Image (tube, rainbow, N blue to C red):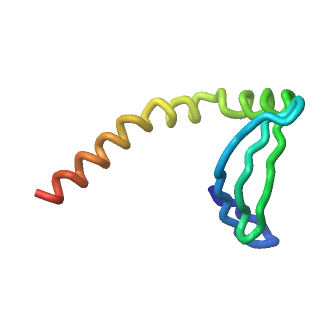
Amino acid sequence: MKVVSPAGDFDISIKESGVEGNSIVLKGQMGVWDSKIYLTPSDLWLFLSLFIRPSILLFLLKLPLQLILRRFKKDEKRI
């Protein structure tokens, strides 16, 4: 994942997830810094409401087919 902002561009990698108290915690790195992202129940509802949109749902539905086609093209090039 990547964060793009006027302050700079930062790569974010999530290494693991877990639960602490009433939050889901994503552990990883942002650039060179170790980081934790805490998602509360209200944060999760916000993300769900942002992702339940026609364009996002269509993208998610097409994703498996795109991955299969990409893999097929890679296998075809090896022959």
Instruction: Name the quadrant containing residue 8.
Output: bottom right
Instruction: Name the quadrant containing residue 35.
Output: bottom right
Left/right of residue 26 with respect to residue 23 in the rendered view: left
Q: Residue at x 55, y 29 (%)?
A: 57
Instruction: Name the quadrant containing residue 65.
Output: top left
Residue that lies at the very extreme toward the left in this rendered image: 79
Number of marks: 0
Across and down, in percent, residue 22 comes to 88, 29
| 54 vs 59: above or below | above
Q: Residue at x 64, y 57 (%)?
A: 13
Quadrant placement of the N terminus:
bottom right
Across and down, in percent, residue 12 comes to 68, 59
Q: Residue at x 16, y 59 (%)?
A: 78
Quadrant placement of the C terminus:
bottom left
Across and down, in percent, residue 39 comes to 82, 38
| 48 vs 33: above or below | above
Q: Residue at x 72, y 33 (%)?
A: 50
Across and down, in percent, residue 28 comes to 71, 55
Q: Nearer the viewer, residue 4 or 77?
A: 77
Left/right of residue 67 with respect to residue 23 in the rendered view: left
